[in-house]
């Protein structure tokens, strides 16, 4: 759960996000969101230029059945465990810079596995710190990253993903240590 103050994304006197099915029970919303985003992930993903617009279109694709604001950067400040993510007024600028850097790095193509894992860890750590959306960041990040990995010639073996190890690595990267995330990525491409 995210920490947010005066959150227009939630039902009044609740932490449950306003959603298209008007589910006001968190467990029901979580179950619906997981089911529908997983189903959408199995469909062909939107094509794009692997830029911020493309990333937003992937979020929209995954969550269009759940949230009216799917694919739109958040407008509120949020934090997790007291650690703030990028302020909403900086999301567009920071995201565009990150995706410009990805483009300048030729979308991480023509790199050996270790270099790819190291650079991909930095990209994912920065993308996570931006946390562009009110909800659905992790799933959007992984989906987009899988496209980048495929394009770079290092396809992910998602079946090898350990969600707990990935979460711990993402937290470590948020604290400035990208090594565990690079190790997780290296395991997924090995």
Image (cartoon, rainbow, N blue to C red):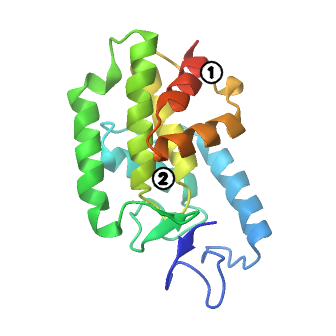
Question: Closer to the camera, 114 or 50?
Answer: 114
Identified at 64% across, 66% down, the residue is 1
Element class at badge 2:
helix
How far across and how far down the image is residue 186, in percent?
A: 54, 19
Quadrant of the image containing the C terminus: top right
Image check: 89 left or right of 165?
left
Element class at badge 1:
loop
Identified at 74% across, 71% down, the residue is 26
- Quadrant assignment, res 110: top left
Q: Tell me the crowding category of disc 2: few under 14, some 14 to 19, or many 20 or more residues within 10 angstroms, Cα based.
A: many
Q: Which residue is mark 2?
A: 59
How far across and how far down the image is residue 71, in percent?
A: 43, 59
Q: Is residue 145 above or below residue 16?
A: above
Mark closer to the chain start, 1 or 2: 2
Question: Closer to the camera, 160 or 144?
Answer: 160
Q: Is residue 117 above or below residue 131?
A: above
- Quadrant assignment, res 92: bottom left
Residue 153 in sight in this render: no
Identified at 45% across, 13% down, the residue is 114
Image check: 120 left or right of 42?
left
Instruction: Give the label on residue 157, or none.
Output: 1
């Amino acid at each position: 759960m995210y920490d947010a103050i005066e959150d227009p994304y939630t039902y009044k006197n609740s932490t449950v996000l306003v959603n298209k099915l008007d589910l006001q029970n968190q467990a029901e919303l979580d179950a619906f969101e997981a089911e529908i985003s997983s189903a959408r992930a199995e469909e062909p993903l939107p094509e794009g230029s692997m830029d911020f617009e493309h990333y937003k279109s992937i979020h929209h694709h995954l969550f269009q059945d759940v949230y009216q604001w799917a694919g739109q950067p958040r407008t509120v400040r949020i934090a997790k465990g007291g650690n703030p993510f990028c302020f909403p007024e900086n999301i567009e600028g920071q995201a565009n810079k990150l995706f410009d850097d990805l483009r300048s790095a030729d979308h991480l193509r023509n790199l050996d596995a270790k270099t790819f894992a190291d650079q991909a860890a930095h990209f994912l750590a920065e993308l996570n710190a931006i946390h562009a959306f009110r909800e659905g960041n992790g799933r959007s990040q992984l989906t987009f990253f899988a496209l980048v990995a495929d394009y770079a010639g290092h396809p992910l073996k998602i079946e090898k993903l350990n969600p707990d190890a990935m979460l711990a690595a993402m937290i470590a990267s948020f604290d400035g240590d990208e090594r565990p995330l690079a190790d997780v990525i290296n395991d997924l491409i090995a």
